[in-house]
Image (cartoon, rainbow, N blue to C red):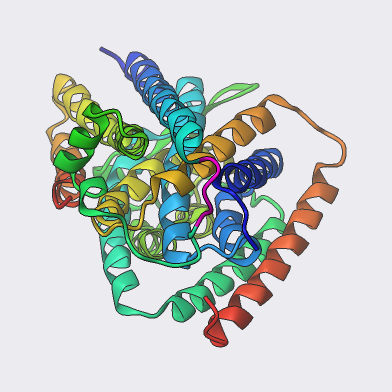
Amino acid sequence: MHITVLSFTMLIALGSFFAGFLGALTGLCGGVVIVPLLTLVFGVDIRYAIGASLVSVIATSSGAAAAYVREGYSNIRIGMFLEIATTIGAIVGAYIATKISPGAIGIVFGAVLIYSAFLSGRKQPEHRISDTPDRLALSLRLNGAYPTPQGLEPYTVDNVPAGFSLMFGAGILSGLLGIGSGAVKVLAMDQAMKIPFKVSTTTSNFMIGVTAAASAGLYLSRGYIDPALTMPVMLGVLAGSLTGARILVKAGTRTLRMVFAVVILALAVEMIYNGAAGRL
Amino acid sequence: MDDKKTQAIIGSLLRTGVFASAAVVAIGACLLLARNGHSSHTYHIFRGEPAELRTLGGIAHAARRGEPGGIIQLGLLLLIATPVARVLFSAFAFAFEHDWMYVLITLIVLSVLLYSLLST
């Protein structure tokens, strides 16, 4: 079958627009569906797909972070400190990517997709103020306050070493799979460090661009970033997420999240199957 | 310079970087589709990009000659540079607050980023 570059580009831009749109609407990382979309639906080689996804992740996270930073939710000190772990992890991940087969990358990708689908069905955890503040958090001045309708609310940060190690893992996955690893970042910041939900999601968003930039340079020099393929993905995802962020749907978000979770689960099974069968 | 002002500057820095890069990529996209729109694609076979589209010098050269692929890569480089510029700005902002521990932390992150970028 011969599809021209023009129609192929339009189809990819449309698919990427929907991925970005759904990602922004549901608050899930739309980035995780880009690689399965490109490889499973469009038959693109997984290395090109990862390169294109990585670049689009920088675009959407920087675009969203621009808005959040101004609102004062993101904690720049937490972000900066944890970026040491995520950027070094990202370089390690980009290095691992050259050592393992595309099939193995597909299987790891599938596992991360299953975990992301599981997370999307979960409730937001409550936050509390710890009685025994973490000493590292104190000396690194990570504790802060965030705006609520009742005024600024202070919070403390727990388990800094555990959070830092998990962030190193999030960086590895980002560099290996070309994703933002939002799911692992949530695990590190919500579950381990006990940061309030609004602060952890916006700070994690703030960090994703820097993490992805750390491995993007290596992907570029390896020839994984194809201009003709990356162009519709980046522009499509960016336009989709900006549109999604503008539309406020209160009703139906839960149903949408469930549908999206099922789609992610189906993609996960197919990624693992194709990876194991050596078809990626 | 207080935290609020720093955050406002970081916000507009990120926004400007993303939109400038999207504009450059879109220009390259139009040129590319006008020139190669009707040929068939081969993304299912991995060949790796030619040398001129994977190094900083090569991309600058190709973009100056008006090659669509080079212009798109230049836009993507601009995008990759946006978070790097944010980190660089943070280093100055922390230095302005005399927060030397965070200047150090920021410089560590910056050197990791530059290691990756300069290896291209």
Is residue A185 among the parts visible in the rendering?
Answer: yes
In magenta stretch: residue A23: no
Is residue A192 among the parts visible in the rendering?
Answer: no
What x and y, as percent, mark residue B36? Answer: 47, 41
Give left or right: position of A152 versus A259.
Answer: left
Q: A203 or A249: which is nearer to us?
A: A249
Which image quarter: residue B59?
top left
- The residue positioned 53% from the left and 78% from the top of the image is A107
Q: Quadrant of the N terminus of chain A?
A: bottom right
What x and y, as percent, mark residue B22? Answer: 44, 28
Give left or right: position of B98 versus A4.
Answer: left
Q: B51 or A173: which is nearer to us?
A: B51
How many tags in the picture? Answer: 0
Vertically, is A204 above or below B82?
below
Q: B74 or A174: which is nearer to us?
A: B74
Which image quarter: residue A250?
top right
Vertically, is A151 above or below A99?
above
Q: A221 or B4: which is nearer to us?
A: A221
Q: Main secondary structure of the magenta part?
A: loop
- The residue positioned 76% from the left and 51% from the top of the image is A257
Residues drawn in magenta: B37-41
- The residue positioned 36% from the left and 25% from the top of the image is B17
What x and y, as percent, mark residue A112? Answer: 55, 68
Q: Extreme bottom residue here?
A: A277
Vertically, is B119 above or below A43?
above
What x and y, as percent, mark residue B52? Answer: 21, 47
In magenta stretch: residue B38: yes
